[in-house]
Amino acid sequence: MHFGLSFEQQMIVDTVRSFVEKEIYPHEAEVEKSGEVPLELGHQIRDRCLEAGYYAANISEQFGGGGLSNLDFTLLERELGRASNALAVFFGRPSGILQACNKEQQEKYLFPAVKGEKFDALAMTEPGAGSDVRGMSCNAKQDGSDWVVNGSKHFISHANIADFVIVFIATGEEETPRGIKKKITCFLVDRGTPGFEIRPGYNSVSHRGYKNCILNFDKCRLPEGQILGELHGGFDVMNEWLYATRLTVAATSVGRARRAFEYALPYAAERKQFGQQIGKFQGVSFKLADMITEIDAADWLTLSAAWKLDEGMECNREIASAKLYATEMLARVTDEAIQIFGGMGLMDELPLERFWRDARVERIWDGTSEIQRHIISRDLLRPLGG
């Protein structure tokens, strides 16, 4: 196992970091203040990303994407994690699930998404069904060759800019050894489809400007050609293409933690109290030691999981561990960075209070910390009959 980056990997890291520093950092304060990203600014970021050749880097080369490995893409996401989510979303990473499109769907959805002509959003969560996907009540009933959808979704990230949404919907029930469970199907739904409405969501303290939306379906009629994958095969599609998205959350958490640390370290070396730099006080120096140790641990845990995924090894537990540890690490590191700065750390002249607020949601979306602990413990106990 090699722990150093190849020339190509280092180029990814350097290029993406330079991109976020030049194209995203200068706009962060204004987005934080207004809570909005002007569409022309978003399109500017998209166009610069296309020019740099990194748009749709996660999509296979056979579909026109960059075809990065899971490890290389994790390195890319780590650097994007340093930037505001509201702006970084325009650094195009179409949902990998679109690679499940059939030929006709590829022309309408996948290829335009890869070219930056269309944005997608992914919708699973409902008011009564978050981590419990099978508990969803948004349903579709067959009517001839169409499916009629009723219900709602919420907390749907960046649906406000989406041209279409990838939606998981209950399409029936089945008997299982553990009782009746819902069958889930994945649909592609265009903005503007009759009976489909995208509404503004809730105001969140995390990631200002990165909108969450509410989706309403009222007798929304979808042709069977809008099904992505197989009928009732939503979990198959989800497990093949989506479970590794937890690596993205882990990687972006590592990137943001390093950025917070890069504020705290020089400040500790320069700021003086009682006649000496505060970094010489054990109370501060030990914080720095703990912070960098935790950041490095989360980094290697995440990269190791991505490497195992590329090697075709079973790594569900490792991905869960990376997501769990990196997101909880980010909370601790941002909190300690503020502590080192003292009261100034809470002022909006610095981005630390933003990092601190943004960190809170990472332990919730893409599977809560509790869900990750469940995945990890189940993986450990099942072989022993537990």
Image (tube, rainbow, N blue to C red):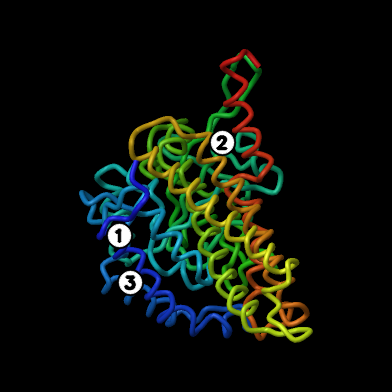
Q: Is residue 169 among what the camera can see?
A: yes
- As shown in the figure, which amino acid type bears the numbered disc 3? Cys
Q: Amino acid under label 2? A: Ala
- Dot 3 or dot 1: first in sequence order is 3
Q: Mark 3, residues whose alpha carbon is within 10 Å: few (<14), some, or many (≥20)? A: many
Measured as percent of width and height from the top left, residue 341 is found at 71, 77
Residue under the point 69% across and 62% down? 286
At which x and y percent is residue 96?
38, 49
CA gap between label 3 and label 2 equals: 36 Å
Instruction: Choose the circle earlier in sequence order: 3 or 2.
Output: 3
What percent of the width, then of the height, locates residue 38? Answer: 50, 81
Residue 256 lies, with reference to residue 280, above or below; the image says above
Q: Earlier in the sequence, mark 2 or mark 1?
A: 1
Side of 30 relative to 234 (left or right): right
Residue at position x 37%, y 69% from top? 16
Q: Which residue is mark 3?
A: 49
> In the displayed structure, does residue 1 sit left or right of residue 136?
left
The foreground one among 2 and 240 is 2
Label 1 neighbour load within 10 Å: few <14, some 14-19, many 20+: many
Amino acid type, mark 1? Val
Picture coordinates of residue 176, whole percent (x, y): 59, 16
CA–CA distance between discs 2 and 1? 28 Å
Given contact means CB atoms under 8 Å apart, are the residues at marks 3 and 1 in contact?
no
Q: Secondary structure at mark 3?
A: helix
Q: Nearer the viewer, residue 76 or 122?
A: 76
When the figure is inspected, residue 32 is found, relative to residue 202, above or below; the finding is below
Q: Quadrant of residue 276?
A: bottom right
Residue position for label 2? 170
Q: Which mark is residue 114?
A: 1
* Marks 3 and 1, how far apart at CA: 12 Å
